[in-house]
Image (spheres, helix red, strand yellow):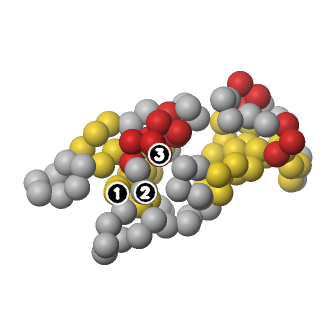
Amino acid sequence: MLTLLVLRCEDIDKTKHFYEQLGLSFREEKHGTGARHFSTILNGIVLEFYPASSHYSVDKARLGFNLPNLAQLPCYNPDLLIHRDEQILLIIKDPDGRTLELGDTMH
């Protein structure tokens, strides 16, 4: 079972703000001399945003979320909708260029 997903970001504050618009909430953390980062828990999985560095570049993971009221999101654009297996998906990019598939839990 997946328990942790760490994403490296060019600007963690900008990325955090983007995901907050999707309804996620984060807390700021810093462990010892480690990097300042943000974390949240989604269905038992810890999602963390860490800054990219010379050792860890920005990743290009593809993520999917089921969200209520997809049409109410600030990033909603009906021109980006696709239909897959009786689900409506909004395909967008986050500030780091990751592709997100946002599904509407109302369908």
Q: Amino acid at mark 1?
A: Pro
Residue underneath mark 3: 15
Task: Tell me if 51 is positioned left or right of 72 in this view.
Answer: left
Q: Return the x and y of residue 27 as percentages of the image width and height.
A: 32, 36
The answer to whether residue 46 of the structure is visible from this angle is: no
Do the CB atoms of the residues marked 1 and 2 lie less than 8 Å apart? yes
Q: CA distance from mark 1 to mark 2?
A: 5 Å
Residue underneath mark 2: 9
Q: Amino acid at mark 3?
A: Thr
**Which of the two discs, 1 and 3, labels the residue nearer the N terminus?**
3
Q: From the image, which quarter does the C terminus lie in?
A: top right
Do the CB atoms of the residues marked 3 and 2 lie less than 8 Å apart? yes
Task: Tell me if 55 is positioned left or right of 14 in this view.
Answer: left
**Which of the two discs, 3 and 2, labels the residue nearer the N terminus?**
2
Task: Tell me if 42 is positioned left or right of 73 in this view.
Answer: left
Estimate how packed mark 3 is, as few (under 14), some (14 to 19) or many (20 or more) residues with alpha carbons within 10 Å. Answer: some
Residue underneath mark 1: 51
**Which of the two discs, 1 and 2, labels the residue nearer the N terminus?**
2
Q: SS of the residue at dot 1?
A: strand
In the image, residue 2 sits, relative to residue 13, either above or below, namely below
Estimate how packed mark 1 is, as few (under 14), some (14 to 19) or many (20 or more) residues with alpha carbons within 10 Å. Answer: some
Q: SS of the residue at dot 3?
A: helix
Estimate how packed mark 2 is, as few (under 14), some (14 to 19) or many (20 or more) residues with alpha carbons within 10 Å. Answer: many
Q: Return the x and y of residue 35 as percentages of the image width and height.
A: 22, 55
* Labelled disc at residue 1: none
In this rendered view, identify the residue nearer to me: 87 or 20: 20
